[in-house]
Amino acid sequence: MPPIAVTDSKPAPQAEKRDSRHEAPVTDPRAVQLGRIHALLQRTILLTTGILSIWLLGPVLMVVFAATLLAVILHNLAVLAQRWIRLPYWLALTLVVVILLAAFAGLIWSSGPTIAEQATRLRIALTTQAYTVRAQLGTSEIGRTLLDHLPQTLGGNQTGGGGDGMGSRIAGSMTGVLSSAFGAVGTLAVILIAGLYFALSPALYANGLLRLFPTALRPTARKLLLVAGRTLWAWTAGQALDMFVVGMLSAIGLWFIGVPLALALGVVAGLANFIPYIGAFIGAIPAILLGLSVGTREGLLVLALYTAIQFFEGNVMAPLIQRHAVKMPPGVTILSQTVFGTILGLPGLILASPLTAALLAVMDKATPPLDESDRV
C-alpha cells in the first residue's frame, strides 16, 4: 500500500491572509461617491473654519503678522551685522536695535521740532484748504449736488440718522479719538516687544510652529516657512529703497516748485508709498491741495511732478527692485489690498502687500509648475 501523503493545513490561512492584502480596491459606486462627498465636506469645513478665523481674529492675526515682519527685518539686519563684524547673534541683534534707536533719537533731537512744526502747519493748511474747496464747490450746482451726497466726515452735507446735539457729537468724537490713540499706542508696543522676542530666538518660535504639523509634512512646512521669511525680507528691503527714493524726489520737486512744507510732504509721500499704488494717491492729495493754495499753476505742476515720480517708480525703480526682490502682478496687488482692506480694515490695507508677497511665494513653491501644454 503506498504511503499516504500528509499535508499541513496551517499555511492555508496565511496564504489566504496574504492574498487578502492584495485585493483590488473597492469599486462600489456608492462607496466611491460617499468618499468624494466626505472629502468635499472636509475641505469645506476647513475652508469655512479658516475664513471665520480670519474674520473673527483678523486684528490679532494682523498684530502677529506685523510682529513677524518686524522680526524678519531685525533678524536679517543682525545676520548682515554678523557678516561684517564677527559677533554672536544676540550681540549683533543688540547692536542693530541700539543703532536703530539711536538713529531715531537723533532724528527726533535734530529735526523733531522742525518736523512737528511742519506737521502742525500742514494740518492747519490742509484744513483751511479743505474749507476753501468746499466753499468753491458750493458756488455751483454740480458742486452742491456733490456736497449733498458726501458724508460730513468727508466735508459733505449728508448727516446720519442720530438726533444728538453738537456737544455730544464732539464729546463722542473726542472719546473715539482718544481710545483709538491709546489702542494704537498699545498695539504698536505689543508689535515692537513681540517682534523683538521673535527676532531674539527665531528658531524657538519656528520650531514650535513646525510641531503643529504632522511629522510627514514637517520638511515641506519647514521649506515653505523659510521661503516666506526670505520673501518678506526681500519685499521689505526693496520697498524701503522705493520709499526713500519717492520721498526724496517728492521733497526736492516740491521745494523747487515753491510749495510750502516740502519736507513734511516728502515724508508723507515716502511713508504712504509703503502701500503700493494706493499709497501714491494718498501721498499726492495733500501736496496737490497745498499746491492749489499757492496757485492753479503750482497745483498743476505738483500733479505733473507726482505723475512723473510714479512713472519713474513704476517703470524704472520697480523693475530694478523686483529683479532682486519679489515680483507681484499689479492686478493681484490691488485686489489683495481691496480684499484685506475690506475684511481687516486699515491694518489689512497696510499689510496686504507683504502678506500677499509671502503667500504667492509659498504657493509658487508648494505647487508644481505648469507644463508648456497647459499654459494659456
Image: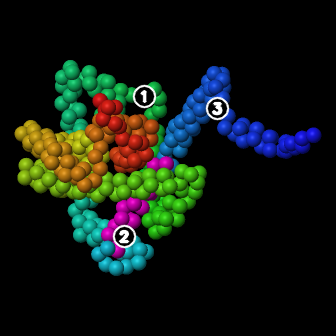
| Residue 339 location, quadrant | top left
Note whether 320 is above or below 146 in the view shown. Answer: below
Q: Which percent across, then down, holds residue 38?
A: 62, 30
Q: Main secondary structure of the magenta part?
A: helix
Q: Dot 1 corresponds to which residue?
A: 160
Q: How is the image coloured?
A: rainbow
Quarter of the image for the C terminus: give it.
top left
Separation of disc 2 and disc 1 at Cα?
52 Å
Asked if the magenta segment contains residue 75, the reply would be yes
Q: Dot 3: what SS? A: loop
Q: Residues within 10 Å of mark 3 (few under 14, many from 20)?
A: few
Q: Circles 2 and 1: CB distance less than 8 Å?
A: no
Q: Is residue 193 above or below residue 119?
A: below
Task: Tell me the number on the disc at residue 274.
Answer: none
Residue span colored magenta: 61-82
Query: Is the residue marked by circle 2 packed among few (<14), some (14-19), or many (20+) residues within 10 Å?
Result: many
* Residue 276 makes an appearance in the image: yes
Marks 2 and 1: which is nearer the front? Answer: 2
Residue in view at x 45 percent, y 61 percent: 195
Q: Residue at x 11, y 51 (%)?
A: 253
- In 3D space, how far apart are the residues under numbered discs 3 and 1 (Cα atoms)? 66 Å
Magenta-span inclusion, residue 39: no
Q: Amino acid at mark 1?
A: Gly
Q: Residue 25 got which mark?
A: 3
Q: Nearer the viewer, residue 96 or 160?
A: 96
Q: Name the residue carrying label 2.
A: 78
Secondary structure under the numbered disc 1 in the rendered image: loop
Name which of mark 2 and mark 3 comes first in the sequence. Answer: 3
Q: Quadrant of the N terminus?
A: top right
